[in-house]
Image (tube, grey):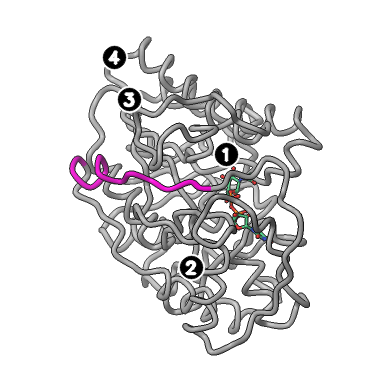
Amino acid sequence: MRVLLTGGAGYIGSHTALVLLEHGHEVLVLDDFSNSSIEAIRRVEQLASASIAVVRADLADLEAARTALEGERFDAVIHLAGLKAVGESTEQPTRYYRTNLVSTLNLLEMMRERAVTSLVFSSSATVYGTPQTRTLAEDHPVGQGITNPYGFTKAMNEQIIRDAQAAWPEFGAVLLRYFNPVGAHPSGRIGEDPSGIPNNLMPFISQVAVGRREKLMVFGSDYPTVDGTGVRDYIHVMDLAEGHVAALEHIAAGVAAYNLGTGRGSSVLEVVRAFEGATGIAVPYEIVAARAGDLAEAVADPRLANNELGWQASRSLDEACRDSWAWQSANPSGFDA
Ligand code: UD1
């Protein structure tokens, strides 16, 4: 298949591009490079010994995207393009809604024009809002208790895709609800390269370890969890990337939602210890106040994806720490060093 990968130069996109190439697919990346680097694409091409077609355009600009894709053929779409910083989304809500919703609307219109019927969408466990059950399964209610515009854009995009499908019966979409992606390709050639101060735990820990930051701030220590710190389901980005390819290869007409997670929870302090154990580097930390909007615990029930997609997360948190460090230590300033 020739797959249009929107946001293909980003963290998840670059790893997904690599796995697509390894599975014999062709990749056409559409990215505006507003928060990613062409160097990521070049490195994926080197790792796969294959080439990737790239078009530079803002998917939220319909005419620009149409023009950029003129003369390009694709059989399916994996849609990852979007803004993803939770804190920023509360400061710039209209920008988040415009970018994340209009991009999806434009993409769906172009798919219809071209009669491309297969879509994999990058959703998030954030659509479950406040967990009502110990682990989160796909039939957990969506939308209640979401705390920020970024999270709402994910839930709204899911609804937009469902409505588009209802009006176009041949169309097939898979909504992938990611838990917490971490790690990097084991070569250390590609990885997560956040701009500015990292919001997420693993890139922050890596930057402390490499000496770019003094210490980790642990947000909250009195959650009702194993050690009082927040518990999440950390999934290796290579497992996540493989989940996209499994989803793509299983698309049928209709809409299906799947969790991509491991089913195992780890606390912040457990992640710190895993990182220290995997790398031999101490990660100094300080416990500070909880972050507004944070959950105590969010862990996937991954059985539906295991059973229906024939996919399972197979890599450990220790491997993710080791691979994050392989990337961070070889690229202390990211791609644009
Ligand atoms: C966050 C978003 C989520 C989004 C995901 C994308 C919030 C509330 N949720 O998830 O919507 O889909 O990122 O990657 O922002 N932590 C620290 N110190 C830090 C950073 C994080 O202690 O410097 C803790 C957090 O409190 C949390 C855990 O580490 O317990 C994981 O945090 P993070 O990586 O930001 O992910 P989420 O909050 O789960």
Q: Quadrant of the C terminus?
A: bottom right
The residues tagged by marks 4 and 3 sit, at their Cα atoms, a distance apart of 10 Å
Tell me the element at label 1: helix
| Vertical placement of residue 207 versus 287, above or below | below
Few, some or many residues within 10 Å of mark 3 (<14, 14–19, 20+): many
Q: Residue 318 location, x and y as percent?
A: 42, 75
Tell me which amino acid carries mark 1.
Answer: Ala
The residues tagged by marks 1 and 3 sit, at their Cα atoms, a distance apart of 28 Å
Q: Name the residue beneath numbered marker 4.
A: 169
Q: Which residues are magenta?
A: 297-308
Tell me the element at label 4: loop
Q: Name the residue beneath numbered marker 3.
A: 255
Q: Are marks 1 and 4 in contact (CB under 8 Å)?
A: no
The residues tagged by marks 1 and 2 sit, at their Cα atoms, a distance apart of 32 Å
Tell me which amino acid carries mark 4.
Answer: Pro
Few, some or many residues within 10 Å of mark 2 (<14, 14–19, 20+): many
Tell me which amino acid carries mark 2.
Answer: Gly
Q: Residue 187 location, x and y as percent?
A: 44, 79
Tell me which amino acid carries mark 3.
Answer: Val
Q: Name the residue beneath numbered marker 1.
A: 68
Sequence-earlier tag: 1 or 3: 1
